[in-house]
Image (cartoon, rainbow, N blue to C red):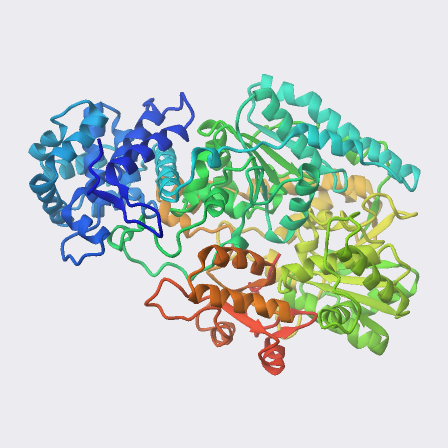
């Protein structure tokens, strides 16, 4: 029988208030359910049983009359925080259970921080949780419970420990004794003496904390059990889709390529049983671009799931948000999946509100974060953030940073990893600095979460030792039945050892125009930085003059209604209004009879515009139109587009190979494509070429000069196989993508040392707070700029602002989701920079009244309907959001 007057949460809207005993029972049950049967802590204690105990005691501190006044919105000047008392009671209960010291500490920390982020554990326990001078408030809370709720406290603990006197035992023991014992046990584990708390104990903490946070938040959010159950992707849907592929083959090479794609599927199906029978946990899929790698990886994951006969989920991780859209479209096309449903979740930072870095403060001392507020998440948001769908498409940042040192909300996703299949697509894009930690995190996935990991790329790095190759006959795909799709040509600027031998952007523009005049229908030029891409596009415009057709300008006119319909994007093959509009748009571009059509792509362009321009560019490659696409690295992975000719600014070898994957991708060109590697000069007032500024910086001991590694790999693997040196040489694709790439990854791998690597040291010492500062992205702060180019987009922002004023929260969530397509993230590396000053002066999305819970300091709105003059200062139809930059790190990939 519950005590109805002791509440966990107040009533909200028409929902009844929640009795504390009910909440504790429900959270305990759910915490147990999200942990698999048979799982244990590193010391062998039953993980599910411990998780249930934490759930049943985590809010024990809410028994005080102080908190009960707070939850009823009554004034009180007594301590209302409850996490520290809950942690002490949890420690006492775990001690009576007789679990190991490491499990006691892991569970105690999980309860202590269930409203906040995990700390640097050693320092956090010693200086805060077990700090003598911070425990007076806990003693006062214990006294209050003894005076007013002693029977209820005894009943709650008796339900956990089958001991009606356990509350009395805790009181008799005293808070000071519990505190001192925790302090002693921390010392016992040597963490105070600068020794490592073991990574195994940290893994226990991650599991227990994530199970508790997930159970607590989803119960407080009212999620039923069935909303947490996944709807798995259906293997039959994939096999049915594969049977529809391969039609309309244009030549023998394309027919042979489709045959190899089918063989790759069959080879994976054949090798998955061997992978599982060998008791392996990490596999690789190594295929050239254009061989259907995404579908092969999904086939591998589904075959693993089927043969393991588990309820595990699929997590598909990609390096960049800019390439998620196409993969999501593929999954929706194959599986007919709702991106926010139980089948598929697309989860990355664009679906979240970016904020300024933490200002500090102790989470447990703020107003109770459990209490339902105006920002209480909707059910689908909770399901998405906790990765409860059958498949989740996400980024490296979301996966690996959440595994390493999760923020409170990030930890909700960890229980979904139990028994999962994790696909890591393009792992070579992981920063070298993180490679040693990623190796340990892959071990965490496989050893603790019983996950299977599939590393999938054309240029496989040496992230882990001796993974199982699901593609065994690799030579068949890289150097076998088909001729090379491309040949590589190295400009003298690319092989020179100095920074002075470069190709200026004006010279590069001349060469690109000459290429188009010489009969090449479509050319891609990939630059290393946004300002380099901007300068190259401007040089093309200057060189061609009025005979250049800027597709971005035509797109702007289409948005304003003066150039046909808006060329919005839809899945290929669907005869919708949108695809017909795009077809008309492309036809009008083709009929313009310009000397050159230019498409400019960077991530300063809105996601919706970028996707539309990519589709337009793809359609134009099939037309008789001299086309040049100037892009940053966003086009190198996950984009299904093919050009006659590719120019690549000098970059790491795996990036060069990725760019080559956009050339003659499916043998649709009559002749072999050519990929030219050159070295572009410094744009504007920069001092260094972009290749040196981005890839040859060695400012930290953990950084490597990847340009030198690329040259050394080419010299060691390519020059012995071709006459002379590389200058002006033509290198076969089969030589570069096998021998040279292997040499490159071997050189890079030898330079990655785990010793002295800060992320590894933080992980092994359970320094979660320090790990959260070691982001995969070199970005401290970004402003989120919503760009409204049409009246309809202006109304979206107006509707969102009105919905917020009127507190229509479901509508707020829906409108925010719609607005992500208009949002451009702009990094700011110094708060005192000119870019930061300009961004701070742009119209905020919401009021910046910091006395409310609303208002994000980083969210801004550029709205054409407000002022064309003001809009034009910060937005260019071709360049997108255009701001003053003075730091070469202001680049996007």
Depth check, front residue: 572 or 477: 572
Does any portion of residue 183 appear in the rendered image? Answer: yes
Q: Is residue 583 left or right of residue 336?
A: right
Q: Position of residue 688 (x, y in %)?
A: 62, 67
Quadrant of image for the N terminus? top left
Looking at the rendering, in which quadrant would you find the C terminus?
bottom right
Say if residue 490 shows up in the picture: no
* Image mark count: 0
Image spot of residue 149 (x, y percent): 12, 39
What is the x, y in percent for residue 347? 54, 47
Query: Of all residues shown, which one is farthest toward the bottom?
Result: 869
Q: Which quarter of the picture shows residue 742?
A: top right
Q: Position of residue 744 (x, y in %)?
A: 66, 43
- Left-right relation of 594 to 847: right
Left or right: where does residue 537 sit relative to residue 644? left
Which residue is at a point 79% across and 59% down the rendered structure image? 582
Question: Which corner quadrant of the image does residue 521 belong to?
Answer: bottom right
Q: Residue at x 58, y 31 (%)?
A: 232
Q: Which residue lies at the image location 14% right of the left edge and 28% below the top edge?
A: 166
Which one is in front, 63 or 213? Answer: 63
Picture quadrant where residue 767 is located:
top left
Query: Which residue is found at the position 83% from the left and 77% from the top?
Result: 545
Q: Is residue 492 above or below residue 439?
A: below
């Amino acid at each position: 029988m519950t005590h109805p007057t002791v509440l966990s949460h107040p009533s909200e809207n028409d929902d009844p208030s929640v009795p504390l005993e009910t909440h504790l029972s429900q959270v305990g049950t759910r915490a147990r359910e999200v942990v698999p049967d048979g799982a244990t802590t590193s010391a062998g204690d039953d993980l599910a049983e411990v998780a249930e105990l934490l759930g049943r005691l985590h809010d024990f501190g809410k028994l005080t009359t102080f908190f009960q006044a707070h939850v009823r919105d009554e004034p009180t000047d007594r301590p209302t925080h409850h996490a520290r008392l809950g942690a002490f009671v949890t420690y006492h209960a775990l001690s009576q259970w007789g679990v190991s010291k490491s499990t006691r500490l892991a569970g105690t920390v999980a309860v202590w921080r269930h409203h906040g982020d995990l700390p640097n554990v050693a320092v956090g326990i010693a200086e805060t949780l077990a700090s003598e001078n911070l425990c007076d408030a806990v003693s006062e809370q214990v006294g209050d419970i003894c005076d007013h709720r002693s029977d209820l406290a005894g009943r709650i603990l008796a339900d956990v420990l089958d001991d009606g006197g356990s509350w009395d035992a805790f009181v008799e023991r005293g808070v000071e004794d519990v505190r001192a014992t925790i302090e002693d046990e921390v010392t016992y584990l040597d963490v105070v003496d600068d020794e490592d708390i073991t990574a195994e104990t940290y893994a226990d903490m991650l599991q227990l904390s994530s199970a508790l946070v997930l159970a607590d938040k989803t119960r407080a959010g009212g999620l039923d059990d069935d909303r947490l159950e996944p709807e798995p992707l259906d293997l039959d849907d994939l096999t049915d889709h594969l049977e529809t592929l391969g039609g309309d083959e244009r030549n023998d090479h394309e027919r042979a390529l489709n045959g190899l794609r089918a063989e790759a599927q069959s080879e994976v199906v054949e090798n998955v049983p061997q992978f599982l029978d060998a008791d392996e946990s990490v596999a690789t899929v190594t295929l050239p671009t254009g061989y259907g790698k995404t579908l092969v990886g999904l086939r591998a994951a589904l075959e693993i799931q089927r043969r393991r006969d588990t309820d595990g989920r699929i997590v598909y991780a990609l390096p960049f948000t800019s390439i998620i859209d196409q993969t999501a479209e593929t999954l929706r096309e194959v599986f007919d999946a709702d991106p926010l449903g139980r089948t598929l979740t697309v989860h990355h930072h664009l679906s979240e509100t970016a904020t300024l870095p933490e200002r500090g403060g102790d989470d447990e001392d703020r107003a109770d974060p459990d209490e339902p507020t105006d920002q209480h998440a909707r059910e689908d948001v909770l399901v998405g953030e906790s990765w409860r769908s059958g498949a989740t498409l996400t980024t490296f940042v979301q996966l690996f940073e959440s595994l390493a040192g999760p923020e409170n909300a990030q930890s909700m996703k960890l229980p979904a990893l139990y028994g999962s299949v994790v696909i890591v697509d393009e792992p070579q894009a992981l920063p070298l600095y993180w490679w040693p930690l990623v190796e340990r995190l892959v071990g965490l996935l496989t050893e603790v979460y019983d996950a299977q990991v599939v590393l999938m790329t054309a240029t496989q790095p040496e992230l882990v030792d001796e993974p199982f190759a699901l593609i065994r006959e690799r030579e068949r795909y890289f150097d076998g039945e088909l001729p090379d799709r491309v040949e590589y040509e190295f400009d003298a600027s690319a092989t020179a050892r100095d920074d002075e031998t470069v190709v200026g952007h004006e010279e590069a523009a001349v060469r690109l125009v000459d290429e188009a005049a010489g009969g090449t229908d479509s050319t891609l030029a990939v630059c290393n930085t946004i300002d380099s891409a901007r300068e190259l596009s401007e040089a093309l415009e200057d060189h061609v003059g009025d005979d250049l057709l800027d597709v971005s300008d035509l797109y702007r006119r289409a948005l304003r209604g003066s150039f046909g319909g808006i060329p919005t994007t839809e899945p290929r093959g669907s005869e919708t209004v949108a695809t017909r509009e795009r077809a008309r748009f492309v036809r009008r571009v083709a009929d313009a009879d310009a000397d050159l059509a230019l498409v400019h792509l960077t991530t300063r362009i809105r996601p919706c515009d970028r996707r539309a321009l990519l589709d337009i560019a793809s359609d134009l490659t099939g037309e008789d139109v001299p086309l040049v696409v100037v892009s940053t690295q966003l086009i190198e992975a996950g984009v299904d587009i093919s050009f006659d000719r590719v120019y690549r600014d000098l970059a790491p070898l795996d990036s060069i190979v990725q760019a080559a994957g956009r050339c003659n991708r499916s043998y649709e060109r009559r002749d072999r494509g050519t990929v030219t590697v050159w070295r572009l000069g410094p744009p504007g007032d920069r001092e260094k070429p972009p290749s040196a500024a981005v890839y040859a910086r060695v400012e930290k001991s953990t950084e490597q000069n990847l340009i030198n590694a690329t040259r050394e790999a080419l010299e060691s693997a390519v020059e012995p196989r071709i006459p002379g040196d590389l200058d002006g040489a033509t290198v076969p694709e089969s030589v570069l993508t096998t021998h040279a790439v292997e040499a490159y990854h071997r050189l890079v791998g030898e330079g990655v040392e785990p010793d002295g690597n800060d992320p590894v040291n933080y992980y092994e010492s359970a320094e979660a707070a320090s790990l959260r500062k070691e982001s995969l992205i070199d970005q401290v702060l970004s402003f989120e700029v919503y760009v409204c180019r049409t009246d309809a987009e202006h109304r979206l922002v107006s509707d969102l602002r009105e919905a917020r004023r009127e507190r229509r929260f479901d509508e707020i969530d829906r409108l925010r989701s719609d607005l992500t397509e208009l949002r451009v993230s702009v990094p700011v590396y110094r708060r005192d920079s000119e870019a930061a000053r300009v961004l701070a002066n742009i119209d905020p999305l919401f009021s910046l009244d910091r006395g409310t819970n609303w208002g994000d300091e980083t969210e801004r709105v550029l709205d054409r309907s407000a002022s064309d003059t003001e809009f034009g200062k910060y937005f260019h139809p071709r360049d997108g959001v255009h701001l003053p930059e003075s730091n070469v790190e202001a680049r996007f990939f």
